[in-house]
Image: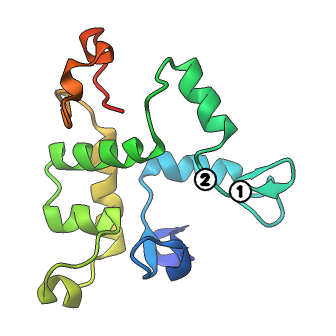
Amino acid sequence: MPIPELGRSVFVIPREAFKSRRPHVVILNDAAWSIVEGQRGLHADWVFAYRGKHVRSMNNTGWQRARREAELPAVRVHDLRHTFATRLRAAGVHEEDRAALLGHAWRTIPEHNASADIRRLVSLANRVLDRVETTTILRVANGCGASPRLRAGLSLCG
């Protein structure tokens, strides 16, 4: 969906395709936006296509191959979401704005009544691109801290 005053667009995920069964607006930071723009026009109907058909899932053979080549076989697609959320928090993005960027359901009536400004959300999403003086946070859950992967220096739990 084009946003003329920003000179860019947003993706709107229809309610049928979103976990909470409500439409969700996806705000991209400048890095993600440039990737999408690089794909535009390569296929007549789809932004992301492979062999003439639209890509239906991120958890596909391309993702599996990338994990293998990066030697990160336990990384899940959903881990990308966790990374984005963690980096938003580290960049000082307020919880309410993180929820809007991640598509979380509103928890309060004031949050429901006060729609987020897209220009502001793009600016906040861009904060994750500045990784100066940040520290990697280990997420240790379900006892995975004792796994051989973590002892070997990897910081991801599967």
SS under mark 1: loop
Furthest toward the right, the residue is: 52
Quick one: quadrant of the N terminus? bottom right
Q: Are marks 2 and 1 in contact (CB under 8 Å)?
A: yes
Q: Is residue 79 left or right of residue 47?
A: left
Question: In this orientation, which residue lies closer to the viewer: 35 or 150?
Answer: 150
Residue that carries the numbered disc 2 in the rendered image:
36
- CA distance separating discs 2 and 1: 6 Å
Q: Is residue 49 above or below residue 12?
A: above
Residue that carries the numbered disc 1 in the rendered image:
40
Residue appearing at x 32%, y 41% in the figure = 83
Residue 98 point in image, percent of width and height: 24, 61
Residue 117 point in image, percent of width and height: 30, 76
SS under mark 2: helix
Residue appearing at x 27%, y 47% in the figure = 127
Residue 84 point in image, percent of width and height: 32, 47
* Amino acid tagged 2: Val
Residue 60 point in image, percent of width and height: 65, 43
On residue 156, the disc is none
